[in-house]
Amino acid sequence: MPRDVIMPALGMAQDTGVLVAWLKQPGDPVAEGDALFEVETDKATMEVEAQAAGFLTDVSAEAGADVPVGQVIARISETAEGSGTAPAKGKGKADNAPAGTGAEDAPASDTPALPEGREVIMPALGMAQDTGLLVAWAKAPGDAVGADDLLFEVETDKSTMEVTAGHDGYVAALLAEAGEDVPVGQPVAIISADKPEAPVSRSAKAAPAKAAPAPASDTESAKAPAPQPAASGKADTSRQVEGPRPPVEAGGRILASPKLRRLALEQGLDLQRLVAAGYPQPFHVRDLDTLKALPADAPAAGAAAGVPAAQARRLTAHVAAPGFEAFARWAADEAGLGDADALLAGLAAASLRDAGDDAALIVGIERFGAERHYTDPDRPTLGRAGAEDPDGAPALRLRDLRGSLLGTVEMGAEDAPVLTLIAEGDALRLTLECAADQLGAPRAASLLAAFAGRMAQPLRHLL
Amino acid sequence: MREITLSKAVNEAIAEEMRRDETVFLLGEDVAEAGTPFKVLSGLVEEFGTGRIIDTPISEPGFMGMAVGAAMTGSRPIVDLMFGDFIFLIMDQLCNQAAKTHYMSGGKLSVPLVLRTNMGATRRSAAQHSQSLHALVAHIPGLKVAMPSSAYEAKGLMKTAIRDNNPVVIFEDKLMYQDKAPVPEEEYLIPFGVANVKREGSDITLIGTSSMVQVAEKAAEILAKEGISAEVIDPRTIVPLDEAALIESVRKTSRAIVIDEGHQSYGVTGEIASRLNEKAFYHLDAPVLRMGAMDVPVPFSPALEDLTVPTPEGVAAAARKLCAGEMIHAA
Amino acid sequence: MAAKAAKPKTNSEDYLRMYRQMVRIRAFEDNANQLYLSAKMPGLTHMYSGQEAVAVGICEALTASDKITSTHRGHGHCVAKGAEFREMFCELLGKEEGYCRGKGGSMHIADQSNGNLGANAIVGGSMGIATGAALTAKLQKTGDVTVCFFGDGATAQGLWYEVMNMAALMQLPVIYACENNGYSEYTKTAEIAAGSLPARAEAFGIESFTVDGQDVLAVNDLTQKLVARARKGEGPFFIELMTYRYHGHHVGDINREYYRAKDEEAQWKTERDPIVNFGKWLESEGLASSDELKSVQDEVHADAEAAVKYALEAKYPDGSEVDMHVYAA
């Protein structure tokens, strides 16, 4: 396991260090503690010692180079030949820089049993977010991962996001379990370059308590795994619907004068509609007439006012072992319920109705551009409802893409909430997309969770 | 109506009050025969004698302190402080003594004195003779602060100040001494704490103090040609402040700019803007803007000095942006 | 103007009154000291004990309408100028019935009814006020004289020189009474004052005097003469009164040997106490018996204790008074 040699940050406000001279040559054996190179900072010239024993290899910075702190400038390998994968050259941003000092320089007591590699941290995705709920791991310890591979899903106060690995390599350690709330900035995984001999998997609670993330790991989070903004921060309508928490993210604020806000409130007008109609912010009282003149939208079920497509929620769920196909076969053979879509619509309707909706429900099943509607497909008995005229307005649309080659969908909100089904090998990926005011955040989450559960174990529905 | 200079208006006010009340006297540097460097007091010593128009040595803390003692014992002194900048010299007497005596004595003693001094830049006098330091004084409870914006205002406010039973500081703009305005022959007083709506308007309120009232009025003229209707208000006294009138105007116009010649930071503009934010927030359609003097010592060179104070064009430009809904500062 | 003159203090009644006033000051301070040390009194206070002959000798030469300005060490001036124990203790304790309704406290007691324009917590802060009060007297021909009390420490303030200059130019009826107790806060006066203090006043053409501040008769005698002259327009005057403060700069200034020796304090207290010595003189002159003096002391102590008790039980001002008296009507 090669050890990276890093340009250390030695000064208070030091961005780079000048590599004055190497004190070892490539291929030289080094002992831990050997003076390895000289570095000049704004304060002084210092000798930097080797952190491990081995052979100096993969030297990527020459004497005289001004190297950003934190950048890998060589490796100490088990053989004089080195890894053959030289660290990035150049003096620019440490694109391929290793994980910050967190992994390499952490004192032994910090994470004694952890394999070496690049840390993947729980990212801070919201404004006032302290922790993220690790919903599920998409990789298992020891799996090979690509930098852009989905590594895990995280749920914040806003939405569920997918986080990619950020590095090529192997999952050397998973440092949190699904369902755990992990402080942002805390490492949740380690990606190693080599296939780990003994990959680690443990709870986040086992992690040593860490104070605020060190600047070094900030670098990491900054460049890391850009999370796919699923339910984007643009949504600001939750305060108008049943969202439990007011929005805090400035990006979602409508810029409007206090007077206009007061007048709009008094007159029951929604400034969001000006946003949706594309009028430039900030809004002032003179925009009031424009707002009043906007045509009233025909909102979808449950919506109080017109909602732009942009104000969308997107949630995904992963059903590792769906039991629906087997259930549908069983239902056809044993109960004579031959329309699998009626069953599908029934499970969806039941999932939506779980939230306490007693009105008549139309669920649309859309496949290859054709849509069929089922009214109350969950009542009185699952799967008895017949397909109907597609002209009615569905409360929920199931878009079945299991037969397609599509991998992910992000379509934005439509006239009704859309649940997309995508096959991932034997597994099933479910994506729920809707306008923020079509479904409140809790209701959207409960719908998707309930439907995913039914797709995994449909029989439980019957129980 | 006859028109007289601000200088003459102040002179008349003091003379009238000295005739009316024998306990009124005036002291300061070169106030008698010299009549001050601005000649504001010329002629008073001839009428009232050196016993009541008292020349002092150049001892600002000394004569300020004496005025406090005289005021506590039945006199109504008017202190002439040649330049507003010298207020720093008399801070203990003004702020620790005069301002607090009534309160500290549980209302038993009072200090009915007038400190008349001046303010205003662009007279090429550099940083120690050009400051507008009224905010310093307005910060201290127990002092009243009047800021006349014309000859008419100067006379009415001075007479009220002399009759007030508290220490009152009057800041006259030294560039306005020769400015004429209609001033009635008959006696009048201008009460403290009553703002003057100089010009009515509906789109934006321009609140100006002292010479900035004229800046605001000129800005309003410019804006009127563009179809923007600006209301101009002169608070007249910043302590007490006619908050209600300012709020009422802003509730009507939804926008306001506060213009004052004191340094912008921690100053009168900030205080008034803050009160409007607190008390008229839901009527604001734009942020309340402050336009004070630049936060630099007043420079000597005309090329630099003229940059430091608000101008009608600058006020009009800012008003234009506010009315257009443009963001002047990043949101 | 002659009517203004205080009666000459020549008879035994006047002497006994001076004795009683000095005892009252001492009793007031002893009680104030106890109140402070027992944490019943908020804030900070400065004891006048030891300097009684100065306040009494001077104030007994003044009429009620003559003015004084006082200092942070001002309880003695206040008592000597005619104040009552009850209102003074109430003020010290921040009570509603205090002279300033609890808004001034120890360092700001003012008693306008007796011509006390107030104590001042800025060292030298009242020199302008005293001079201005004299200016009113001159302009309005009231015949009043103002005595400006200040300590040796205040002679280092520039304001004094400005107002002495003007008082001399205007011939104002003001007497600058410098109580030289040997210490400017925690520093020997010799370390803060160059040359001679009377010489500083004399430089302005002001007649200056130095008197034993522990001798109430000497102080009173000199003051009577100067007050009479000041009323005639012969002022201003300067008096340096050599005296001694028994306590530290303030009540909590207990460990003060670094600037003042205990032997020195003991010597002043045993040999130069203004009350003890004046009492001996009264007895030796046959003006009062020791029993009479004892009964004066007992009466005063009883008065003081009653006033303390009253003040401790008195009401604090209502919260609504907090913004009252910021401005006069």
Image (cartoon, grey):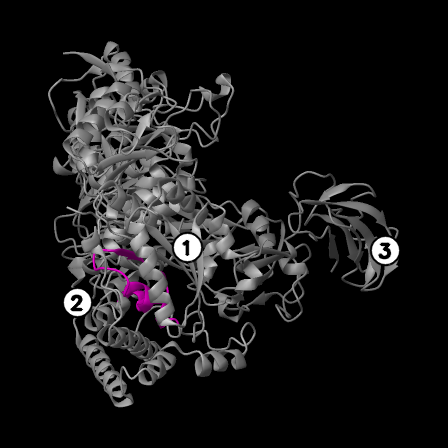
Q: Separation of disc 3 and disc 2 at Cα?
A: 94 Å
Please report, as a chain letter, where disc 2 is located: C
Q: Which mark, residue C97?
A: 2
Q: Position of residue B44 (x, y in %)?
A: 27, 24
User: Residue furthest toward the top?
Assistant: B225
- Labels 2 and 1 share a subunit: yes
Q: Separation of disc 2 and disc 1 at Cα?
A: 36 Å
Q: Please, is residue A17 above or below residue C34 in the view?
A: above
Q: Which residue corresponds to the image point at 22% horizontal and 28% vertical from the top-left?
A: B14
Mark 2, other Cα within 10 Å: few <14 / some 14–19 / many ≥20: many
The mark closer to the camera, 3 or 2, is: 2
Q: Amino acid at mark 1?
A: Phe
Task: Give the magenta-colored segment's residue range.
Answer: C51-78
Q: Position of residue A239 (x, y in %)?
A: 24, 46
Viewed as shown, does residue B328 lie left or right of B273? right
- Residue C66 falls within the magenta-colored stretch: yes
Q: Please, is residue B160 above or below residue C151 in the view?
A: above
- Residue B166 falls within the magenta-colored stretch: no
| Local SS, label 2 | loop
Mark 1, other Cα within 10 Å: few <14 / some 14–19 / many ≥20: many
Please report, as a chain letter, where disc 1 is located: C
Q: Amino acid at mark 3?
A: Ala
Q: Separation of disc 3 and disc 1 at Cα?
A: 97 Å
The reply to whether the C-beta atoms of the residues labelled 3 and 2 are less than 8 Å apart is no
Q: Which mark, residue B53?
A: none
The reply to whether the C-beta atoms of the residues labelled 3 and 1 are less than 8 Å apart is no
- Labels 3 and 2 share a subunit: no
The mark closer to the camera, 3 or 1, is: 1
Q: Quadrant of residue A362?
A: top left
Q: On the image, numbered disc 3 is attached to which residue?
A: A80
Q: Which mark, residue C238?
A: 1
Q: Which residue corresponds to the image point at 22% horizontal and 66% vertical from the top-left?
A: C82
